[in-house]
Amino acid sequence: MSVENPVPESIKFPALTIVDLAAEGEACHCGLPELCLKQGKQQLSKARVFNEQYGWHYHPASDELFIVIDGCLVIDLAGGAELRLSPWNSVTIPAGTVHRTRAEGRTVNICFEKLAAETVFVDENPVSAS
């Protein structure tokens, strides 16, 4: 088990700035790190572009809201359930839910979570949520 506590290096858009999410998705290219779009006092929104799989993990004290802009994001849940999100689909993963994300081809999504949310990585193929 490993723990990650991400703190964004820079915020692209300050508060009260309108963001064209479709344009941001088109401008992103695979291989770029996640891009912190906005930060509030208690919440962070990040754009992610990827075409791979992220490891099994959970966030002990933060829900995680995903909104897919382009591509297909698959979220596997411990215990075997699979959530498939197409463009403009969204889902909230509750705090403490063991999950992993994986892209089918190039995928662009926006993720909302608590500012500096803790991420705890777990063994591959967990049988049940922690």
Image (cartoon, helix red, strand yellow):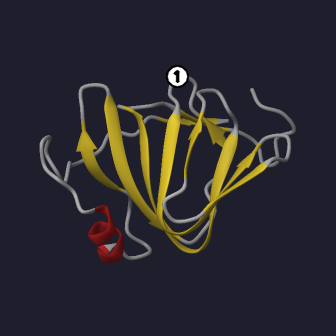
Q: Position of residue 81 (x, y in %)?
A: 81, 47
User: Counting other residues with Cα less than 10 Å from the Cα at mark 1, is it few (<14), some (14-19), or many (20 or more)?
Assistant: some
| On screen, residue 18 above or below 96 | below
* Residue nearest the viewer, comparing 74 with 34: 74
Extreme residue toward the front, this view:
88
Residue 113 image position (x, y, % from top left): 43, 36
Give the SS element for disc 1: loop
Which residue is the extreme one toward the top?
61
The spot of residue 56 in percent (x, y) is 68, 46
Residue that numbered label 1 is attached to: 61
Q: Say left or right for 86 vs 76.
A: left
Rendered view: 29 above or below 120:
below
Total numbered labels = 1
Which of 80 and 126 lies nearest the eye of the viewer?
80
The picture places residue 41, in percent across and down from the top left corner, at 24, 26
User: What kind of residue is marked 1?
Assistant: Ala
What residue is at 25 percent from the left and 38 percent from the top?
A: 39
Residue drawn at point x = 37 percent, y = 69 percent: 32
In percent of the image, x 74 and y 26: which residue is there?
Answer: 130
Residue beneath the point at 34% across and 44% down: 45
Indicate the quadrant containing the N terminus: top left, top right, bottom left or bottom right: top right
Query: Is 79 drawn above or below residue 83 in the view shown?
Result: above
